[in-house]
Amino acid sequence: MKKVLEYFIKELKSFRHAFRGIKFLSSDHNFFFHFPVGVFVFILAWYFELTRQEWLWIVLATGLVWLSEAFNTSIEKTIDLLHPQQHPLAGKVKDIAAAAVFISVLIAGAIGILIFYPYFYAIF
């Protein structure tokens, strides 16, 4: 029993790293934009009383954008650490990571349009 308790205490302490990462990520200018937009989408979903299935898609799409932005920031910071001076290949890696975020935003936008269009159409 003591080993199980020690294991859980160790795991709980490891959450500190995750929360530090979230704190760091929240200071990133791109995440600073994407996070409130996602929260706004959740508010719209609550307002329109989306179905459970629609909520699942909205949460998945928003999470996809937030996760891709987190990976993008991580990749950018790693490249900056490993190669602080400008390098064409480093720039390409950063551009590809940014493209992944852009693709996730396009996917999330398409999901958002498919889900919210009928609700907005009913209002107007």
Image: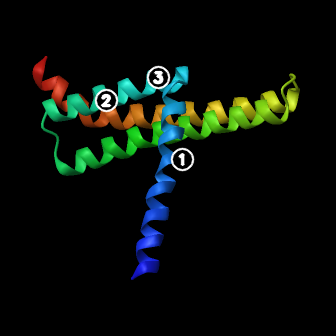
The residue located at (46%, 79%) in the rendering is 3
Per the image, the residue denoted by label 1 is 17
Per the image, the residue denoted by label 3 is 32
Q: Is residue 44 visible?
A: yes
Task: Check disc 3 and report its element: helix, strand or loop.
Answer: helix
Residue 84, above or below 20: above
The tag earlier along the polypeptide, 1 or 2, is 1
**Residue 46 coordinates in the image, percent (x, y):** 16, 34
What amino acid type should be assigned to the residue bearing mark 1? Answer: His
Horizontal relation, residue 25 to residue 80: left or right: left
The tag earlier along the polypeptide, 2 or 3, is 3
The residue located at (55%, 24%) in the rendering is 28
| Res 93 quadrant in image | top right
The quarter of the picture where the C terminus appears is: top left
**Residue 65 coordinates in the image, percent (x, y):** 47, 37
Between 91 and 104, the one lying in front of the other is 91
Q: Are marks 2 and 3 in contact (CB under 8 Å)?
A: no
Task: Check disc 1 and report its element: helix, strand or loop.
Answer: helix
Task: Check disc 2 and report its element: helix, strand or loop.
Answer: helix
Disc nearest the viewer among 3 and 1: 1
The residue located at (83%, 36%) in the rendering is 82
Task: Report the Cα–Cα distance between label 1 and label 2.
Answer: 24 Å
Q: Is residue 96 visible?
A: no
| Res 59 quadrant in image | top left
What amino acid type should be assigned to the residue bearing mark 2? Answer: Val
Between 31 and 119, the one lying in front of the other is 31
What amino acid type should be assigned to the residue bearing mark 3? Answer: Phe
Per the image, the residue denoted by label 2 is 39
Render colour scheme: rainbow
**Residue 49 coordinates in the image, percent (x, y):** 12, 37
